[in-house]
């Protein structure tokens, strides 16, 4: 995961990305709502009108407003241009847990510890439906991305899926309904009651394109449910969290599930294989909330002492140009692009044995300049299980016949140092010279005074190595075992 912005505050219970601006709202347990610019890494504004913790917050997609819900039983609608609360919706009899705007209709969805889910019309500023049926606190309620469905999760150990097609039809009729009329169970019907969790359910999310629902519960599990007409069934249960699972969301564009928990971890799951693929742990903070940017590959997580904005993987394609050829990785494949003919050729499929199942995007691509009889390429991957893959190809790139494919696991980086040798930096920050088939020849001890920690290695001329260590970059001669040139870095310099 690549951190883009992090800030400390009181416990963050709600998060919402703005669709177009680089903004994120964070609602806090101390009653404040903070608006941040995550690109500028700055606090823009604070909104304080709730009495007590604010648990839910959401931007409107097109209007200059957002909605919030808190422990004062109130739902508030704000104008972030005037920086004022426009109006307050009252009716809930207990803590308001989540709030959300409908993408097209002038509706707000809220849920509460009063065991109800409510729909409000923010234009008429009134409630239009009260959904009852849960027998405990309703922890989360959400609209389906494009269907007339609502999913709600409750501590009564169930998830309910409601259909509001008749309410939508009635509310959009010019003559339908009197002002302030609240509709009941006939306009919003329960289509599914998902039962299977052994303890209370904290969160529910719809898949962006498929009829699948994910739920997270106090039984430390995440369940996937399939909806089909009036039928539903449990697809799978994903276990691994060691405490209550606070939140779960689908990646908007990839087959990835994100979850976080009071066990102080944030985890990624492969939806196809239904297994955990990555984990991030905080030392002291329990996680409470997750949010995904609607169009960009940004995510946010809220925890006890603040929140962070991050990306799962780098999106810029690592590449290297050799003459008129550019080697690069895209969509889990290694390609070469010929600048003179403007043709692209597939070299090899990139397979990291499930260690980089998101985008399979390497942090670096290195070409072996020293080999004139063929083409050698190293791909370096980072992450929890960082590794490298080396490929050997015959001289004619258009044939793209891979004669060697070798993987090196638990390595931080590998570079070519001669025609048939490479230097590898392992997880213990130790260096070794290896054959291209991965066989180790010898360990390398850098002969440099005051050397504490090797951060990374980079390509250099024949038999030499560029080393980033401590606060310096130096050119090292492996045969003579001495530093040839050195550049001191300013404190905090990031070497890419």
Image: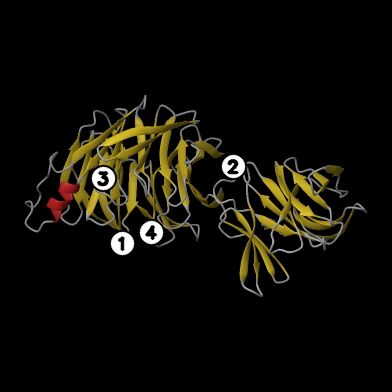
Q: Position of residue 126 (x, y in %)?
A: 15, 50
Left or right, 201 with respect to 397, comes to left
Circle nearer the viewer, 4 or 2: 2
Mark 1 or mark 3: whose residue is earlier in sequence? 1
Mark 3 or mark 2: whose residue is earlier in sequence? 3
Q: Residues within 10 Å of mark 3 (few under 14, many from 20)?
A: some
Above or below: residue 137 compared with residue 488: above
Left or right, 449 with respect to 225, comes to right
Q: Residues within 10 Å of mark 4 (few under 14, many from 20)?
A: some
Quickly name the residue at label 4: 19
| Viewer can see residue 265 | no
Left or right, 127 with respect to 253, comes to left
Above or below: residue 337 compared with residue 138: below
Q: Residues within 10 Å of mark 2 (few under 14, many from 20)?
A: few
Circle nearer the viewer, 1 or 2: 2
Mark 3 or mark 4: whose residue is earlier in sequence? 4
Quickly name the residue at label 1: 62
User: How many angstroms separate mark 3 from mark 4 (CA)?
Assistant: 22 Å
Question: What's the mark number on residue 200?
Answer: none
**Do the numbered discs 4 and 1 sit on residues whose CB atoms are within 8 Å?**
yes
Q: Position of residue 55 (x, y in %)?
A: 34, 42
User: How many angstroms separate mark 3 from mark 2 (CA)?
Assistant: 35 Å
**Do the numbered discs 1 and 2 sit on residues whose CB atoms are within 8 Å?**
no
**Do the numbered discs 4 and 2 sit on residues whose CB atoms are within 8 Å?**
no
Q: Position of residue 196 (x, y in %)?
A: 35, 27
Question: What's the mark number on residue 354?
Answer: 2
Above or below: residue 274 compared with residue 368: above
Mark 4 or mark 2: whose residue is earlier in sequence? 4
Give the quarter of the image for residue 400: bottom right
User: How many angstroms separate mark 1 from mark 2 (CA)?
Assistant: 39 Å
């Amino acid at each position: 995961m690549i951190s883009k912005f992090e800030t400390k505050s009181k416990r963050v219970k709600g998060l919402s990305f703005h669709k177009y601006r680089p903004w994120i709202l964070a609602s806090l347990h101390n009653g404040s709502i903070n608006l941040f610019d995550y690109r500028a890494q700055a606090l823009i504004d604070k909104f304080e009108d709730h009495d007590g913790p604010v648990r839910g917050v959401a931007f409107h997609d097109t209007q200059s407003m957002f909605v919030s819900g808190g422990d004062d039983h109130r739902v508030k609608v704000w104008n972030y241009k005037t920086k004022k609360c426009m109006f307050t919706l009252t009716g809930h009899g207990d803590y308001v847990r989540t709030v959300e705007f409908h993408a097209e209709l002038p509706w707000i969805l809220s849920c509460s510890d009063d065991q109800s889910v409510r729909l409000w019309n923010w234009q008429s500023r009134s409630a239009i439906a009260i959904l009852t049926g849960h027998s405990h606190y309703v922890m989360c309620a959400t609209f389906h991305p494009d269907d007339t469905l609502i999913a709600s999760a409750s501590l009564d150990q169930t998830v309910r899926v409601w259909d509001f097609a008749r309410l939508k039809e009635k509310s959009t009729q010019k003559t339908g309904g009197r002002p302030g009329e609240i509709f009941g169970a006939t306009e919003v019907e329960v289509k599914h009651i998902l039962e299977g969790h052994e303890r209370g359910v904290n969160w529910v999310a719809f898949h962006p394109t498929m009829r699948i629902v994910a739920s997270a519960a106090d039984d430390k599990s995440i369940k996937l449910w399939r909806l089909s007409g009036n039928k539903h069934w449990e697809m799978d249960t994903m276990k691994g969290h060691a405490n209550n699972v606070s939140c779960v969301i689908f990646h908007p564009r990839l087959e990835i599930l994100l979850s976080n928990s009071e066990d102080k971890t944030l985890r990624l799951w492969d939806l196809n294989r239904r297994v955990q693929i990555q984990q991030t742990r905080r030392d002291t903070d329990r996680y409470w909330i997750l949010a995904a940017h609607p169009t960009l590959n940004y995510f946010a997580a809220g925890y006890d002492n603040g929140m962070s904005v991050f990306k799962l993987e780098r999106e810029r394609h690592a590449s290297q140009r050799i003459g008129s050829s550019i080697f690069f990785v895209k969509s889990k494949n290694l390609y070469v692009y010929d600048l003179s003919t403007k043709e692209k050729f597939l070299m090899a499929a990139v397979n990291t044995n499930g260690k980089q199942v998101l985008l399979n995007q390497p942090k670096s691509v290195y070409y072996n300049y020293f080999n004139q009889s063929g083409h050698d390429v190293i791909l370096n991957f980072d992450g929890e299980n960082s590794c490298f893959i080396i490929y050997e190809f015959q001289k004619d790139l258009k044939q793209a016949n891979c004669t060697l494919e070798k993987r090196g696991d638990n390595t931080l980086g590998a570079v070519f140092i001669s025609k048939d040798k490479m230097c590898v930096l392992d997880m213990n920050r130790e260096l070794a010279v290896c054959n291209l088939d991965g066989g180790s020849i010898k360990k390398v001890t850098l002969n440099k005074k005051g050397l504490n920690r090797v951060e990374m290695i980079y390509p250099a001329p024949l038999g030499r190595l560029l080393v980033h260590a401590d606060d310096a970059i130096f050119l090292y001669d492996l045969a003579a075992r001495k530093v040839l040139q050195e550049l001191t870095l300013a404190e905090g310099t990031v070497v890419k």
